[in-house]
Image (cartoon, coloured by chain):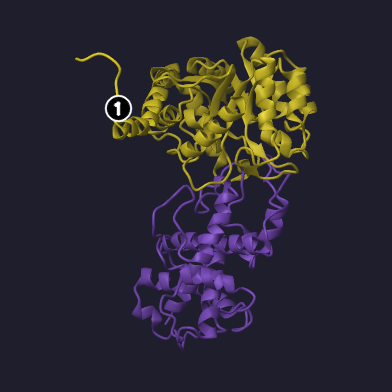
Chain colours: A purple, B yellow
Amino acid sequence: MPGLLPPRAGVALVAVFAVAALADAQAPQGKADAGGFPAPTPELERGRAVYVLSSCHFCHGVDLTGAQMGATDLMHSPLIAADQNGNFIGPVVRAGKPNLQTAMPSYPDLTAQEIADLAAYVHYLRRQGRYRELTMDAEEQGDLRTGETYFKANCAACHSKSGDLAGVAAKYPGATLRARTLRPSDDPAPAGTDRTAVGRQQHGKLLERYAAADVRNVISFLRER
Amino acid sequence: MKQGPMILTRREFGKVLAAAPLAAGAAQQQRPLYAINGVGLGLETFSFHDLPPAADPRLIPTIISNMREIGIGECEIMSGHIEPWPTIATGWWVQSRRAPGFQKLREDARKWRLSAPMSYYTNIRKQFEDAGLRIYLYNVNFNETFTDEERDKTFEAAKALGAAGFSSSTVISEARRLVPFVERHKMFVAMHNHNNLVDPDQFATPESFETALAMSPYFKATLDIGHFVAGNNDPVAFIRKHHDRTINIHVRDRKRNNGPNRPFGQGDTPIAEVLRLIRDEKYPIRCYLEYEYGSFRSSVDEVKRCLDYCRRVLA
């Protein structure tokens, strides 16, 4: 349901997001270490190295859950949701937060590439975590009119309920429809086209931003006959 | 059995050499280390970042097993490792007090504290002592969410654990509240610093320590030399001036200007200078390792590396 950006707008700017989104569907593989599981791509593994070796995981959690010592919950932080390729994450990480009770250290020596890698990894973790959270949300009825409004604002640029999504609610049972809404696994566009990349990127961004009610409302709207 | 000089073949000699570290390791397991060249050594259990969660029955045995494997005999143990609550439940982090559900969590923790039998703590103490280990400090972060009854009970808990006193990441306003408690229980509270230079209630500067030290002779310092340096302070000067009121230091390496934690020897903290000062001046200040830099290795492996660094600089 991409729709926040025009189809081609973000490809060059946030290619690193696409890497994260492509990796979203992959389960952890390899042997876990003190920094969690190895990341599924070399790019994300570079980001994991920055995240772990900068000791971010001690306060923010190896998978962004269980934040400690008053640290920001990165899984639900609006700043992370708004970040693109480290444009918000980078300045905070470089400057630290010296006014916190237990000050967040500053990392002024991180390079632009390290910040980009770190941001990509944080977004990857967030998408993994948000997907887990939202797929476990209770299957309650949402508000279909609110869902329609959300759909028009965020999804209608690429999707139509009477077009590519016609019959989708009847085709998939509840849990599958929810999972595919959150993270479509079979994008109808041919692989490698701009539309695919932007679509995955947009779904990844939405996944980071959905409130639980948004998902319930949109699914209710899709189910409406 | 034939007596006399033992002559080994080259292959046998190689086997002996290969086994030597194992034998040394076994000996170390039997006799935990309490000091190097007269400098008291220990660790802060916060160093173990991969422990089972609070209330998990494996938690204390894992801490004991980790200390035995590292070979260190003495510790400062966090309340979150003793009580069946994560430290967040007892109100230290101001940010966390705003979280949904905090009030209920805090109230539940308080009820538990006030009703826990002393045998709960003495049982933990026994587990440490049976393993040849000692809890020297109980790390409790006293704060304004404590009731007076809770403060009293926490002092009783520290005694039951066998701790000589507390280390506490507290604030100056709470220190004022603690004065009658330290006087009544005749037990010290050593203030632990971070490096928040913005909030004047925080322990971060020499002046903040001195404010508390002037309140009661039972107030001491747990100087975290890494955080102190991150706040652009000089730990050597502090220790020279306040060695008689400094119970222990937390040994970590941070960069100046609120910089990050680094492996020992790679930051701006004068660890070697501080340890040698304590050794040479024979200050009775314990040096507790605190591992908090990033690594893919286990906490036990990294604390061993921290210990090795200290061994080298104190050799």
User: Residue at horizontal 76%, vertical 31%?
Assistant: B234
Residue B175: image x %, image y %? 70, 23
Q: In which quarter of the image is residue B217?
A: top right
Q: Can residue B149 be seen in this view?
A: no
Amino acid type of the residue tagged 1 in the rendering = Leu
User: Residue at horizontal 29%, vertical 20%?
Assistant: B6
A21 left or right of A70 in image: left
Q: Can residue B153 be seen in this view?
A: yes
The 10 Å Cα crowd at callout 1, few under 14, some 14 to 19, many 20 or more, is: few
Chain of the residue where label 1 is placed in the rendered structure: B
Residue B10: image x %, image y %? 32, 33
- Which is more toward the observer, B175 or B106? B175
A3 left or right of A104 in image: left
User: Residue at horizontal 54%, vertical 28%?
Assistant: B43
- Which is more toward the observer, B297 or B22? B22
Residue B57 drawn above or below residue B266: above
Extreme residue in the left direction: B1
Q: In which quarter of the image is residue B3?
A: top left
Extreme residue in the bottom direction: A163
Residue B231: image x %, image y %? 75, 38
Residue B306 drawn above or below residue B113: below
Residue B53: image x %, image y %? 44, 38
Q: In which quarter of the image is residue A184?
A: bottom left
Q: What element carries label 1?
A: loop
Residue A92 drawn above or below residue B73: below
Q: Mark 1 points at which residue?
A: B8
User: Residue at horizontal 58%, vertical 52%?
Assistant: A73
